[in-house]
Amino acid sequence: MDIQMLTAWIGSRAEQLRGARDRGATSTELAVIAGSLLLGAGLLVVAIRTKLAEKIGIINGG
């Protein structure tokens, strides 16, 4: 997973959530967008943890 791609995707979803809220979207629409933001944030955490584990392995000579 590419960290830059995930952060860009999360940013676009956050912008979409702001726009939907401003135009008066239904609570279901807002919940779907918020759910996708949570999923993206979880994927970002996994990507960062994986990248750090790789770096620690390299530092420790593994």
Image (cartoon, helix red, strand yellow):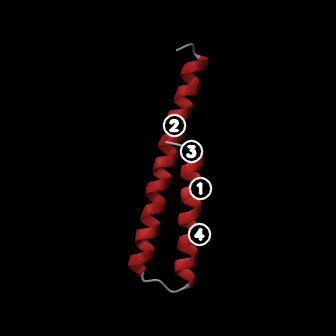
Q: Which mark is residue 57?
A: none
Q: Secondary structure at mark 2?
A: helix
Q: Are dots 1 and 4 in contact, CB under 8 Å?
A: no
At 54% from the left and 43% from the top, the residue drawn is 2
Q: Secondary structure at mark 1?
A: helix
Marked residue nearer the N-terminal end (3 or 1): 3
Q: Are dots 3 and 4 in contact, CB under 8 Å?
A: no
At 54% from the left and 21% from the top, the residue drawn is 57
On the image, the x and y values in percent for residue 50 come to 50, 34
Marked residue nearer the N-terminal end (2 or 1): 1
Hey, what amino acid is under mark 4? Glu
Marked residue nearer the N-terminal end (1 or 4): 1
Q: Which residue is mark 4?
A: 15
Hey, what amino acid is under mark 1? Ala
How packed mark 1 is, by other alpha carbons closer than 10 Å (few <14, some 14-19, many 20 or more), is: few
Q: What is the distance, in whole Å, between disc 3 and disc 4 at their CAs?
A: 18 Å
On the image, the x and y values in percent for residue 25 come to 47, 83
On the image, the x and y values in percent for residue 23 come to 54, 85
Figure check: 39 above or below 59:
below
Hey, what amino acid is under mark 2? Arg
Q: Residue placed farthest to the left in the image?
A: 28
> Along the horizontal axis of the image, is 52 left or right of 27?
right
On the image, the x and y values in percent for residue 47 come to 50, 41
At 56% from the left and 32% from the top, the residue drawn is 52
Marked residue nearer the N-terminal end (3 or 4): 3
Marked residue nearer the N-terminal end (2 or 4): 4
Q: Which residue is mark 1?
A: 8
Q: What is the distance, in whole Å, between disc 3 and disc 1 at their CAs?
A: 9 Å
Q: Which residue is mark 3?
A: 3
Marked residue nearer the N-terminal end (2 or 3): 3
Q: Which residue is mark 2?
A: 49
